[in-house]
Amino acid sequence: MSILPFRKLAIAALLGSSLAAQAAAEPYLYGPVRGGEQLARIAWELRPDKTRIGTWQMTAALYRANPRSFIEGDIERLRPGAMLTVPADEDVRRIEPELARQLAREPGKARTLLAEWAASAAAAPTATAPEPAPVVAPVPAAPAMSSGLTLQQAPTPASAPAPAPPPEAATAKVVPAWAPDPSPRTTLSLPTLGTAPAPIVPPERRRPDVDPRSIPPEPEALPDPNRMTRLAPVAMPEPWKQYEKMPVPDRWRILNSLGLVPQRWWDPYNQNTWKGDKPIYKNEHFVSFNATLDSVYEYREQPTPIGGNGTGEGGLLDLFGRPQQYTLASNLILSAAYIKGDTVYRPPDVELRFTPVINYNYTAVQEAGAININPAKGLDRRDSFVGIQELFADFDLRAVSDHYDFDSIRFGIQPFSSDFRGFLFQDNQLAIRLFGTRANNRYQYNLAWIRRLEKDTNSGLNDISAALRDDDIFLFSLYRQDTPRFGFTSQGIVAYNRNRDSGRFYDKNGFLQRPAVIGTETTREYDVVYLGYNGDGHFGRLNLTTSAYAALGRQDRGVFFDKTRDIRGFFAAAEASYDMDWMRFRLSALYGSGDRDPYDDTATGYDAIFENPIFAGADSSFWIRRPVPLIGGGGVALSQFNGVLANLRPSKEFGQSNFENPGIILVGAGADFDITPQLRIFGNANYLRFDDTAILELMRSQGGIGREIGWDLSVSAIWRPFFTQNIILRLSGAVLLPGEGFRALYPDEDGYSVLANLIFSY
């Protein structure tokens, strides 16, 4: 007697369900892991629950199930080529959501957190009630068939217990890393039990007047796109080589081969060999050429001293002459760089850079002697100069981690900024600098020795033909990202300024720069240590920049009497801003201490080494941009060109730091408006005061000088016609509304300036 067809189907169903359950219970592997593949991405593909918590749970479960697949146990350093055991769904869901969330926030503590969780889970008591024995109803056996096969119904318990977990399979399924589905279906082979009956096909029904349907022919194969572009097809690599690096010869010229990106030497917008986009030799030698024309025209009125016997107009008996002045200055900045190395993910092995600047400047005034000590030189001045602003070599010393942390050394004339806004030192000077990163670029450090170059008088560029100054700066700074919280970078800095400038130094226009023409008019030697903290970043939507410095040291004599004085100066600044769509609103505050008693043993005024502050409107502000001479008080200025401190130097380019000054207090507000992607308008309003006016009263032999400088108001517009930095037009206007202190120094004298700046860059 043969088995009936429906019994064959029942046997097949029983066998199929058993094999499918066994296959589903087997663990499977994922891999091999490719180089650069992230654990979070793998967890996202394999997660049982399609939620963010599910991804974090799968990440923790994969790390717990594969401890040897991570370099030094670091959850963020997955070992290339590893085969990962994928845990079962119930093991993944057993990971507590809060634990998974904490692992995502603090991946460095993954091993400790999982160990603590496992220990607490093992120590937790478990109690299960005894289950009653199942009641099985007897079932009579089916009659025997001629084939000798007996079918018996499985016992059905009244209350079946939970099935025991299946035993671990001897062999595990392998899911390659390139498979789209990490859980492929299992194909089962069933034994042949007989010949199945032929399927019943219903007869075709159609109208007798209609022809039978015709099957359309197969469409013609599309042409090979590789052969259409005359490119030979590339064979797919073997699966086990997927995680290896595949070399691509000269990857920079693939676009040129396709003819998609034309290259023109004069085009900086597209791929260009001369802009460092492609190597000139092999695959690691690059060159980059840049050119920038920066032109400034400024008309201003500011307090100007009378020309004395050489004045251009007779009958003037006052100290103050005609205030009108204007300047045209143009800088052609040329830069050439050679770079060796693969600079995509790591610093270059070698970098050589040379940047000469060609300057032309023209200045006209209304008072003879204002721009040259010799009144016979007239009321205007034309000058030109070529300065070297960069000339350095940079060598990568070593890589210190798999994250391309490095140590490099750079020596020569190079740009350097001591902090985020240039409050202490920002200039291009001769230096030896050791710098690098640690902990995946979370720490950056600088160790530098700077020997200052003399400057050209009228252009402010480096003059390498002059002897070096006896002025040294030794500096160490350390940056740490995400401190004290994510999105904020903190920096600590220690700088030592040793100044031994001696003798008398006159600039190109004949004015005495060292020593300053105030007090005893003698050169000083000083040693000052600057201790500082700087921060820059954001707290949510609030952007914040902070800076604080203490200047501690000693000078061999004071400015006003020949006696050793200690130095105790302090500085603090902060700027907060808040973005609202296309608008940014800013609040600024700054304090530089002043000297309250020029005849005691301690100079309490604060002065920087070489400031260039990007703060409170920067050079669009009248006070920051224009050096206002202290008329009748010596050959010094209240503040310096591109400087915010009231430090009473002859100039910041040539003069020594002066810690006997009135100090400065600034409180300001500003706003930036991105009207279009091409046009930005911003304005600033700053209120200025002296910290103490004892020094000013001594220098002017004038009592009752108030502390209020006044209000500095400015507005600027920046237009980028091509949405890039290649062409920039800037217009700005600023006015100083004098307060009682400024009025006491300059009666009936105001100050304002109008500036136009045009920049072309290649």
Image (cartoon, grey):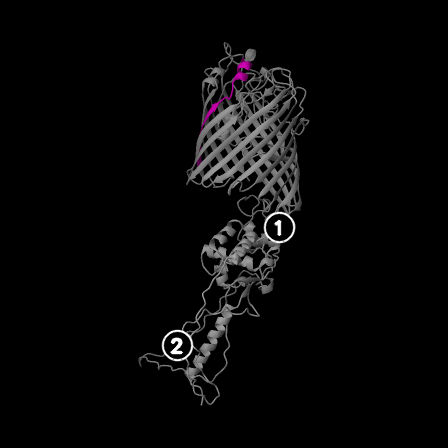
Position of 156 relative to 57 (above/below) = below
Give whichever of 475, 339 is nearer the camera. 475
Query: Which of the marked residues, 1 or 2, is nearer the chain's N terminus?
Result: 2
Say which mark, if any, is on residue 402.
1
Was residue 335 drawn as part of the magenta stretch in this picture? no
- How far across and how far down the image is residue 198, in percent? 42, 84
Give the quadrant of the N terminus. bottom left
Give whichever of 418, 8 is nearer the camera. 8
Give the quadrant of the C terminus. top right
Crowd tier of the residue under label 1, counting other residues whose Cα lies within 10 Å: few below 14, some 14–19, many 20 or above? few
Counting labels gives 2
Residue 305 visible:
no
The local secondary structure at tag 2 comes to loop
Residue at screen point 53% across, 16% down: 694
The reply, left or right, for residue 62 in relation to residue 686 is right
Position of 653 relative to 310 (above/below) = below
- How far across and how far down the image is residue 582, in percent? 42, 39
The reply, left or right, for residue 318 in relation to residue 443 is left
- How far across and how far down the image is residue 518, in percent? 59, 16
The local secondary structure at tag 1 comes to loop
* Quadrant of the image occupied by residue 62: bottom right
Say which mark, if any, is on residue 605.
none
Give whichever of 36, 566 is nearer the camera. 566
Was residue 696 drawn as part of the magenta stretch in this picture? yes
* Disc nearest the viewer among 1 and 2: 1
Inspect the image, locate mark 2, and give the three-letter code of the amino acid beneath it.
Answer: Ser
Task: Give the residue number, with chain letter if any, for mark 2.
Answer: 214
**Which span of residues is magenta-colored?**
680-700
* Quadrant of the image occupied by residue 467: top right
Crowd tier of the residue under label 2, counting other residues whose Cα lies within 10 Å: few below 14, some 14–19, many 20 or above? few
